[in-house]
Image (cartoon, rainbow, N blue to C red):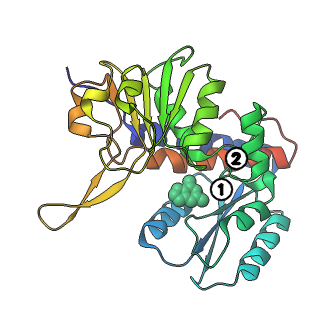
Amino acid sequence: MTARIIDGKIIAAELRARVAGEVARVVREHGITPGLAVVLVGSDPASEIYVRSKHKQTQAAGMASFEHVLPVDVAQDDLLALIARLNRDPVVHGILVQLPLPKSVDTETIINAIDPAKDVDGLHPNNAGRLAGGFAALSPCTPLGCIILSKSVHASLQGMNAIVIGRSNLVGRPLVQLLLNENATVTIAHSRSRELAQLCARADLVYAAVGKPEMVRGDWIKPGATVIDVGINRLPGADGKTRLVGDVAFQEALNVAGAITPVPGVGQMTVACLLVNTLRAACAIHGLPKPGV
Ligand code: GUN
């Protein structure tokens, strides 16, 4: 049997349309236009593509988009001064500093400087801690997207066996917390875990976010499981071009899984969830009720 393909593009487009509807309502009823500031340091080509996509989609949702591009050799104090200005700016409700940052700046110092109320990446320790404590928090966008994709297959994740492979602050760790909030049973695995194949074989939900090309093999997967592959790895192809592969051996998994994301399958969801977080941050900052998305 061939797995059903989980179409992140369509699900993200539906989510963006719902965000746009709620943004229009907030503008109409309260005169507030949610605003997102994205800070890009340097000119990493992949980061530039993400930032451009965020800019376009933010505007398409009816929100204000502010882009700040700084040179790769920016002084840390100048970056901190920009963040302080954005923290104070009343038209900015969300601040995202594109990662990875150059080695000359300390990522932790930069993230800690963002006002937690505007931390739409959910990376500030206040938000990460609140999420881990089970309190309301702005949560990282890729894990939020993973949950929505999972719920497009299963109305409820309650009691399901989930495995999260990868423990990054951006994906693995927050995803574990969100799955716990959904009452899933969660195994946390990573590149050093022993007997990963056996751990994986028990999982109804497999989340691969470890950054190792095609590490998860088809015969690791329980027949009928749902597989969400967050990995985007560039490998040299036979024809000299680069080949995009996930953390899951897609062709193998396709014949075993019940549902699976293609590669890249989650990126559009990340951006759509960023719009959700910006709308939620704007409503919270202005004391409005939580929006309907
Ligand atoms: N780089 C890759 N993904 C992300 C993300 O979700 N947020 C930020 N800030 N940087 C990223």
Residue density around tag 1, few if under 14, some if 14–19, many if 20 or more, within 10 Å: many
Whether 210 is drawn above or below 111: the answer is above
Reading the chain from its start, which is encountered first: label 1 or label 2? 1
Quadrant observed for ligand 1 in the rendered image:
bottom right
Q: Position of residue 137 (x, y in %)?
A: 75, 40
The residue lying furthest to the right in this view is: 287
Identify the disc placed on residue 224. Answer: none
The picture places residue 31, in percent across and down from the top left corner, at 80, 52
Q: Mark 2 highlights which residue? A: 279
Looking at the rendered structure, the kind of residue marked 2 is Leu
Residue 63 numbered tag: 1
Decide if residue 18 is in sight here. no
Instruction: Say if 83 sits above or below 262 in the image.
Output: below
Determine whether 3 is above or below 18 in the image: above
Asked where in the image residue 259 lies, by quadrant, the reply is top left
Residue type highlighted by circle 1:
Met
